[in-house]
Amino acid sequence: MKMFMRVFVCAVILTLFTGSVDAGDSWKGTAGLLHVQEAGTVGKGKLVFSLGTAYSRSTDVLITDGPGSFLGGTGLTEARVDYNFFISRAMLTLGLNEYVELSTGLNVRNWIMQVGKEDETGDFGTRTRGGVGDTDVRLKLCPPIPSD
């Protein structure tokens, strides 16, 4: 984890000294700090740092008591809750040459179950979970297509 934090801090410092990038359309799929996954590579010698997040919400979900239920031991037989899911990702991509890129990413996941006031008791209330999710390392190969 210390090694990842060192790489992360170095990437942030490098982006501070490299000047700004105008946002705009690009056939390579990059604009600013957001790298969109697509068929091409970032290019030889390029280092791309990207941040992204996804959010999902499910409202008014009915949960019932049963084995493994959050309601176990609360005296409630059912309750209505809202679920909120956040997944954030930091990625660092390096173009080794025009046809190969190496990237690493770290996901941070958060889950919130909000309980309505009418169902909240001393034993059953809003809960949160979160932490580091998948850490992945990717190698993208994009050889040129032979043409006549």
Image (spheres, rainbow, N blue to C red):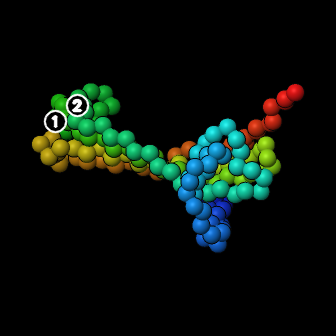
Identify the residue shown where x is 70% and y is 57%. Answer: 47
Where residue 81 sits: x, y (%)?
A: 23, 39
Residue 147 found in image quarter: top right
Where residue 68 sits: x, y (%)?
A: 33, 31
Seen in the picture, residue 146 relative to 114 is either above or below; the reply is above
Identify the residue shown where x is 80% and y is 31%. Answer: 145
Residue 74 found in image quarter: top left
Q: Using the rendered image of the protein, determine whether residue 95 is visible from the camera's viewpoint.
A: yes
Q: Position of 133 compared to 2: left or right?
A: left
Where residue 111 sits: x, y (%)?
A: 37, 45
Tell which tag, 1 or 2, sits nearer the viewer: 2
Distance CA(mark 1)–CA(mark 2): 16 Å
Which residue was labeled with disc 2?
A: 62
Mark sitting earlier along the chain (1/2) = 2
The quadrant of the picture occupied by the C terminus is top right
Q: Position of 119 compared to 87: left or right?
A: left
Say which of 19 and 107 sits in front. 19
Type of amino acid at the residue the image marks with label 1: Gly
Farthest residue to the bottom: give it: 17
Which residue was labeled with disc 1?
A: 75
Identify the residue shown where x is 62% and y is 57%. Answer: 49
Label 2: element kind: strand
